[in-house]
Amino acid sequence: MAAAELTRNPRARQACLPGKVRCVWARAFACVWALTLSSAGILTLAGSPARSTTRELLGLTLTAAHNPPPRVAAVLALAAHNIPIAAWPLLLGLRGPPRRQMTRRLVDALVIACAIANTVPVGAALGAYGAPLLAYVPQLPLEWAALALGYSSWLVQRRRPQGVGERAQSLAVIAGLLVCSAALEVYAVPHR
């Protein structure tokens, strides 16, 4: 009777990411947050002069009056800007995993440099501005999830080739995360 209807169909629900990517993504996500929070912590520990200098360099204005009213066009523009930043590692290894160790190391260095370039400024802003900045970055967990997914794609590709379907699935998840992130960034922050 009802028991037959409650048995799980293995094909009924597919995960949004393949197993290996999911596992590697969790580590990449933790690393992205570690870079962000460690740079925030270092700046906080550096003291008031370092925080003041960083505020001057960043020049953020944390007032609702400086944020325009929310618009769908702004969401789409932000998503279009962020998708290539997060998804470019999907293009790495299109011809298969690099055979040479030197090539893998160079690409590893490039991916790490991009991770640092994306996370350290945000961490610096968090360290310089503190809690008042949090109201202006509600999208950060989703952005970092998408960024980590792009980086984790490379970590999988460096060991084994990824198929077109696997890459397309990752790209779809990255795009979905970043559209949601952009909506939060436009609609959930204080604005006039």
Image (cartoon, grey):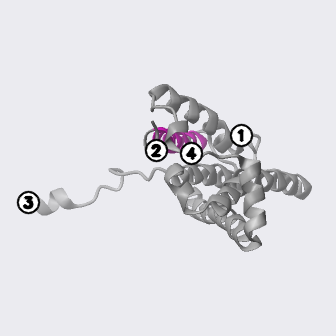
Residue at 82% over, 50% down: 110
Q: Evaluate if marks 2 and 4 touch, with contact meaning CB atoms under 8 Å apart.
A: no
Q: Residues within 10 Å of mark 1 (few under 14, many from 20)?
A: few
Q: Residue furthest right?
A: 102
Which residue type carries mark 1?
Leu
Mark carried by residue 190:
2
Q: Is residue 160 visible?
A: no
Q: Secondary structure at mark 3?
A: loop
Closer to the N terminus: mark 3 or mark 4? 3
Residue 170 image label = 4
Q: Secondary structure at mark 1?
A: helix
Dominant secondary structure (helix, strand or loop) of the stretch shown in magenta: helix
Residue behind mark 3: 1
Residue 169 among those drawn in magenta: yes
Q: Position of residue 48 (x, y in %)?
A: 73, 67
Q: Amino acid at mark 3?
A: Met
- Judging from the image, what secondary structure is the residue with disc 4 in? helix
Q: Residues within 10 Å of mark 3 (few under 14, many from 20)?
A: few
Q: Tell me whether circle 1 and circle 2 mark residues in contact (CB < 8 Å).
A: no
C-alpha gap between disc 1 and disc 2: 36 Å
Residue 129 lies, in percent from the top left, at: 63, 58
Q: Amino acid at mark 2?
A: Pro
Magenta highlight range: 166-186
